[in-house]
């Protein structure tokens, strides 16, 4: 990860609202993300997860509150490459004729300029990015010959090649088979080991449960939960319990439902539900 920050935080949102034209979809969000945190952003369909992350990238309207990225007001941030973005459900079109390496090298453009040649250092960073996502052996292949999951990894490598200070991923595991989801989770583990700060929109928390250090839940555009995976598991267990017993009480069922106390990275068996 490159670059120094004028503030210690990566993302600092206070009462932040984002939306389209002047319709706020995400409202009053307070969120501080520190270096090294891996935050999963959960919520039902249409709750505003993509709107929030795309708002950070300046891809929709910032309608209120304060949004600071790396200590700088979002509107004044010049080095946009510091936010690495892997968009939702995006694969590389078959109409693009390019090798895996060429796609990843696009990530170096903010550093090298459009017309400059790639330096040895650029080439080394491209190689390292490919290695991190486990695609070194496919570098010279046409991207269109890769599977959906592999293409998703190419896009992660492209984002990493820009050496961002935070990696924002919108549903990195969506629409790919379960085996590929676990390969992707391995890639994310490697990034965690390097201290990469990540904000991951996901519905498939089960595949990422050992990766995330914090869970934020959005509902109808508002943050309704922000805590550790262990606290989230406890909350879900308590909700399930209330739901199961609602009104008529069966004492003999209680112990089976009691949440297990865990650490931040402890087992979080209840996290597999698709929506928060
Ligand atoms: N480009 C857009 N213009 C106008 N409204 C939009 C646009 N994109 C999304 N919305 C609206 O914003 C709301 C939140 O959508 P968003 O895609 O942020 O939710 P989400 O939580 O990411 O959903 P999903 O899990 O289905 O991806 C929805 O009502 C949606 O219709």
Image (cartoon, rainbow, N blue to C red):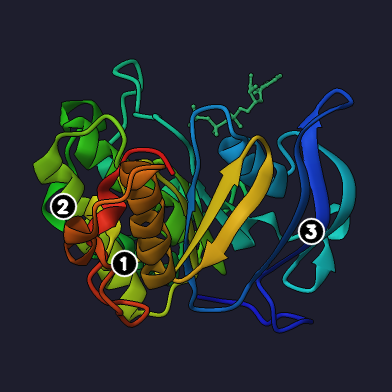
Could you say where residue 133 lies in the image, as x and y percent from the top left? 24, 58
Task: Tell which circle, 1 or 3, labels the residue nearer the N-terminal end.
Answer: 3
**Label 1 belongs to which residue?**
211
Could you say where residue 122 lies in the image, as x and y percent from the top left? 43, 65
Separation of marks 1 and 3 at Cα, in angstroms: 30 Å
Quarter placement of the C terminus:
top left
Q: Residue at x 63, y 78 (%)?
A: 3
Q: Residue at x 83, y 55 (%)?
A: 15
Q: Is residue 57 above or below residue 96?
A: below
Q: Residue at x 62, y 63 (%)?
A: 82
Task: Tell which circle, 2 or 3, labels the residue nearer the N-terminal end.
Answer: 3
Q: Is residue 135 visible?
A: no
For residue 78, the mark is 3
* Front residue (pair 143, 259): 259
Separation of marks 1 and 2 at Cα, in angstroms: 11 Å
Q: Residues within 10 Å of mark 3 (few under 14, many from 20)?
A: few
Q: Say whether marks 1 and 2 touch (CB < 8 Å).
A: no
Could you say where residue 18 lies in the image, as x and y percent from the top left? 78, 39
Compared across the picture, whether 230 is left or right of 267 comes to right
Q: Residue at x 21, y 38 (%)?
A: 149
For residue 202, the mark is none
Q: How many numbered badges does the structure rendering display? A: 3
């Amino acid at each position: 990860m490159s670059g120094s920050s004028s503030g210690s935080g990566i993302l600092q949102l206070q009462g932040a609202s984002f939306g389209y034209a002047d319709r706020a979809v995400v409202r009053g969000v307070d969120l501080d993300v520190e270096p090294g945190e891996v935050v999963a952003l959960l919520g039902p369909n249409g709750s505003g997860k993509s709107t929030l992350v795309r708002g950070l990238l300046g891809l929709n309207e910032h309608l209120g509150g304060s949004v600071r990225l790396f200590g700088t007001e979002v509107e004044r941030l010049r080095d946009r490459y510091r936010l690495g973005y892997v968009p939702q459900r995006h694969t590389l079109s078959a109409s693009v004729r390019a090798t895996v390496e060429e796609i990843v090298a696009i990530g170096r453009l903010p550093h090298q300029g459009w017309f400059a040649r790639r330096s040895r250092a650029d080439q080394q960073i491209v190689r390292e990015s490919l290695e991190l996502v486990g695609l070194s052996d496919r570098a010279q292949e046409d991207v269109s010959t890769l599977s959906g999951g592999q293409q998703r990894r190419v896009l992660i490598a492209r984002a990493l090649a820009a050496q961002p200070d935070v990696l924002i991923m919108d549903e990195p595991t969506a629409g790919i088979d379960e085996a590929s989801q676990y390969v992707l989770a391995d890639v994310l583990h490697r990034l965690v080991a390097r201290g990469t700060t990540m904000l991951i929109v996901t519905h498939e928390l089960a595949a990422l449960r050992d990766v995330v250090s914090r869970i934020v839940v959005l509902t109808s555009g508002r943050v309704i939960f922000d805590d550790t995976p262990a606290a989230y598991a406890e909350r879900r267990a308590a909700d399930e319990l209330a739901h199961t017993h609602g009104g008529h009480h069966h004492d003999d069922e209680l112990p089976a439902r009691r949440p297990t106390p865990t650490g931040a990275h402890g087992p979080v068996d209840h996290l597999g539900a698709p929506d928060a």
